[in-house]
Image: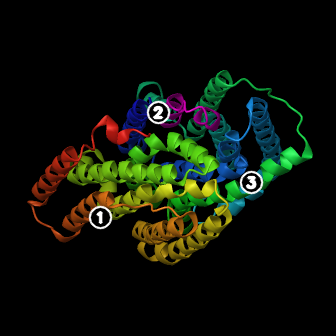
Amino acid sequence: MIAKQIERNGWFTALGFFLGAVNVLLLYTRVFTPEHYGTISFILASASLLFPFLSLGMQQTILRYFEGGNDKNRKQLASLSLQLISMFSVLLLFIIIGFDQSIADKLSTSNRVDTEAVYAIMIVGILMAYFELFFALTKVHFKTSAGVFLKEVFPRLGILLLLGSHFVVQPLELNFFLLMLGIIYLIRAIVMGIIAYRLMPFDLVQKGTQSDYRRLLGYSGLVILGSGLSLAFLEIDKVMLHTLSSASNVALYTVFVFMATTIAIPLRSVQPLYNAKCAALQHQQNTEGLTALIQKTISISSCYGVLILAVLLTLQPVLRFFLPEDYHTAFSVFPLLLALKLIDSSFTPLNAPFYYSKFYQTYLLFSLGFLLIMVVLNVLLIPVYGIYGAALATGAAVLLFSLLKVWATTKFLQIKALNAGHLVPALFGLVFLGVELTIHAPWLNGVRVGVLLLLLWVFWKRRVFSTTFLGYS
């Protein structure tokens, strides 16, 4: 059942990325100017950075405490989590209403930020927080496909229809687009809430004791920091590009980061089930099962990730055909972004075991240190190298942090994260990137195709495409 669910999640995630590709490659770049598209990217990236704080970390708190409670405790956990997010969201909205212009002025450096953008960031961030809370309530029941569809497909399909209306109905204005974007995220949160409630009905309002709130907020404080740091690794480069460079550079960078992020499709397919199963195994103190789970997830993420990397590098001439001429100059940064995303998606499974262990605070200190390194590198490199500086800064920090996570998993959790089977995708990734960076000849694409076919043959022999490979025991 889990293997089929992972496969279904994979198709939903791939469909979501396909719709996103249509939006990014064909519609955003033609409907909006690079400056306006850069502003939209800035809003979505900022909302993603804010949502862990707006959610108070409740989505991870549910995964942490759900397994150890009875039915009454679980329903109380859901109710109190919803109440805390609602109270915090109302408080923040009042603050935004009172200080909207001051906040907009603070965010305006190289590029002007209007109060409409401030409201869009906050509203989208709050709706993301509600969605992730409800999604967590389905993860603990190991029913994730509906949530994956709503997370990966629904908003991109809504945006595709909205952008398509520019050509069919009337030209889109930026502010109207932001309004409709908020409505899309609102519908998504409501539908996810209905699904979660049907799986486990709970009281929308329930009185909790001080110790209940203290227990939830104590752990959620750590989760807020951890989730914020994790998302910062993904989004801080775009936000800093907007601050230190131009909005058009953010648009260029966003397009190629999106294409490179397709490498994470396999990870995002297994992650909802992986996180819930990881939390359960941690609660059971099943180190052997947790080791097998981590190694399996890294295998899935790295094998399919390197295959996607190979396909994207081979299809570069096709991507050039679809992208407007203004975006062609950024193709030289594409291999670096692909390498960055492959490393990140391969080692992201090492985050979850720390979330539910006594070493979470140690992990957060490591995360904070490397985020500061990333920020410093971005500050130094973006003004000089633009989007190349952002990619180099993020890539260096992600590589070092991934190596540290492998060491920390062995040192603190007594878990061997890597095995000999992980060498195969690593070697093929190095071969592809080596070919891309060293060969500059008309027959380069022939070499790419040859290596891709060899990779497919090796993976077929290793049964990488079988249902057994995807299954969790």
Q: Position of residue 36 (x, y in %)?
A: 51, 49
State whether residue 38 is above or below residue 26.
below
On screen, residue 186 above or below 132: above
Nearer the viewer's eye, disc 1 or disc 3? 3
Q: Residue at x 11, y 54 (%)?
A: 450
Is 75 displayed left or right of 3 in the figure?
Answer: right
Quarter location, residue 15: top left
* Left or right of 431 on screen, residue 250: right
Q: Which residue in the protein does label 2 denote?
A: 153
Residue 443 place in picture, x, y as percent? 8, 60
Q: Residue furthest top?
A: 198
Q: Which residue is mark 1?
A: 332
Tag 3: Cα neighbours inside 10 Å, few (<14), some, or many (≥20)? Answer: many
Range shown magenta: 136-153
Q: Residue at x 24, y 49 (%)?
A: 311
First in sequence: mark 1 vs mark 3: 3
Which three-letter amino acid code belongs to the residue tagged 1?
A: Ser
- Where disc 3 sits, the SS reads helix
Indicate whether residue 16 is drawn in magenta: no
Can residue 195 be spotted in the picture? yes
